[in-house]
Image: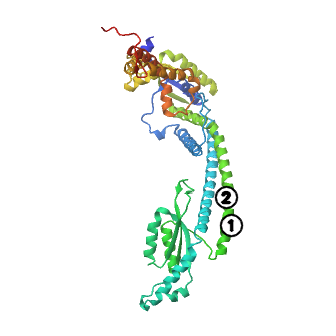
Amino acid sequence: MGSLFRSEEMTLAQLYLQSDSAYHCLSELGELGLVQFRDLNSGVNTFQRRFVSEVRRCDELDRRLRFLEKEMETSGINIPDAYDDTDVPPPSDLIELEAKFSKLEAEIREINSNQERLNRNFLELTELKHIFRQTMDFFPEAEQALGQEATSRRYVAEDELGLLDDSRVRNYPLSFVVGVIHRDRLPVFERLLWRACRGNVFLRHQEVDVELKDPATGNSMLKSVFAIFFQGIQLRNRVSKICEGFRATLYPCPETVAERREMAMGVATRIEDLSTILSRTLDHRYLVLQAMARDLRKWTAKVEKIKAIYHTLNLFNVDVTQKCLIGECWCPVADLERIQHSLRRGHECSGSNVMPILNVMKTSMNPPTYNKVNKFTTAFQNIIDAYGVATYQEVNPTPFSIITFPFLFAVMFGDMGHGLLMLLFALFLVLKEKQLAHFKGGGEIFSTFFGGRYIILLMGAFSIYTGLVYNDCFSKSFNIFGSSWS
């Protein structure tokens, strides 16, 4: 029981590893989780360490995995959870993982690029369809309005004639441009068009009755269809520049009604064909991402373990022959045999001829604090560590808090009914802990409850006791023992 009330006795050890077996030995030590390495290269820049290139390659793999995960979340694909017993791949598999992830990323980016191009074409055809549907009534009104304006200007003096006087009406036929623009830009667009062209244009617009989607971001857009009628080449150039400045999209539109109707039918046919292609593209993208999702968590765990190993190897010194890595680590004295066994197992996996050497050193440095915990005491130890970590070999207050913390909560809570509900909920988490250990669908709140299931269990048990003493159940008072007051 001594190790329960005080931190473990630690010792400083020096580790000699051959370069060929260092990766596998550290992999076994990492799975054991009983060793803390010291940085022997604290004076060396991070980018000048021996295994920095491998760490960068792992960072690139992490980036590609995050990209794939983001694409899966965008498509609403459920990513299965990976178990914690994922094996550490050998260092030669890093090249294979790089090639695989690069191919997967390139495939998804190509699909996204094709999908964006198809969405852009679909948006253009949809806008053109709304132009033909909503601008049919614009042309007769525009011709009538410009005709009345030209007739009224016949009575103006010769030196005050505008751009649309009777002679210019005869010389320049009626021209027009049609397009779409964001709805919030339309008032300023109309005002600037009127002032820049001095009132010599006729603008008609109508809102698109459906929301359009941006092909790049997927956000909804509200747009309006407009038609601008004018006469003359100079006005055409001026109108085109204003439309370009407001990022309005102009579309070709035939001048005759028959041609417009024929073009509208062709646009409707192309929209149907494009919708079919887009649907198949989305299905193909979903199937590709769904196939990747089955192994995503396992790939992520492998990359994280490889990165952790190379990051730890950067803490080692390299001897003059470049064939041996020298490191220093703190380890519990009681677990030295387990550490030796893990090193032997890593040596066998690597196939090296040189055995790793672990030498215990005497030092005057202050060892780190290591408290051995299990699944019952982990949550209580985390509560104590949140207030402060005890110094080396100092008394550990965790065993005392196992009783005092839930009991003081029960003194405050003191309800037999609610305590029973807490007890049943915690009992369910304890009995189903093997199945729920790998469940990550509940988010951070569920992880907090599951990690403190034994605390909740004791709090519920003590709350039943104090609720019985307080004669309180579901906030309702009751009398079981009777009153001794007289």
Q: Residue at x 65, y 50 (%)?
A: 282
Residue 157 as seen in the image, left or right of residue 71: left
What label sits on residue 240 in the rendered view? none
Judged from the image, the secondary structure of the residue bearing numbered disc 1 is helix
Position of residue 266 relative to residue 400, above or below, is below
Circle 2 residues within 10 Å: few <14, some 14–19, many ≥20: some
Question: Which of the two residues, 174 or 67, is positioned nearer the viewer here?
Answer: 174
- Give the position of the N terminus as an image quadrant: top left
Q: Residue at x 45, y 85 (%)?
A: 162
Q: Inspect the image, locate mark 2, and give the three-letter code of the amino acid beneath it.
A: Leu
Position of residue 452 relative to residue 118, above or below, is above
Q: Inspect the image, locate mark 1, and give the three-letter code of the amino acid beneath it.
A: Gly
Residue 110: give x, y in percent of width and height: 63, 52
Question: Which of the two residues, 150 or 159, is positioned nearer the viewer here?
Answer: 150
Q: Earlier in the sequence, mark 2 or mark 1?
A: 1
In the image, farthest residue toward the front: 486
Whether the residues at callouts 2 and 1 have beta carbons within 8 Å, the answer is no
Judged from the image, the secondary structure of the residue bearing numbered disc 2 is helix
Say which quarter of the image contains residue 20. top right
Circle 1 residues within 10 Å: few <14, some 14–19, many ≥20: few
> Which residue is disc 1 drawn over?
266
Residue 430 visible in the picture: yes
> Which residue is disc 2 drawn over?
274
Residue 7 visible in the picture: no
Residue 342: give x, y in percent of width and height: 57, 21
- Give the position of the C terminus as an image quadrant: top left
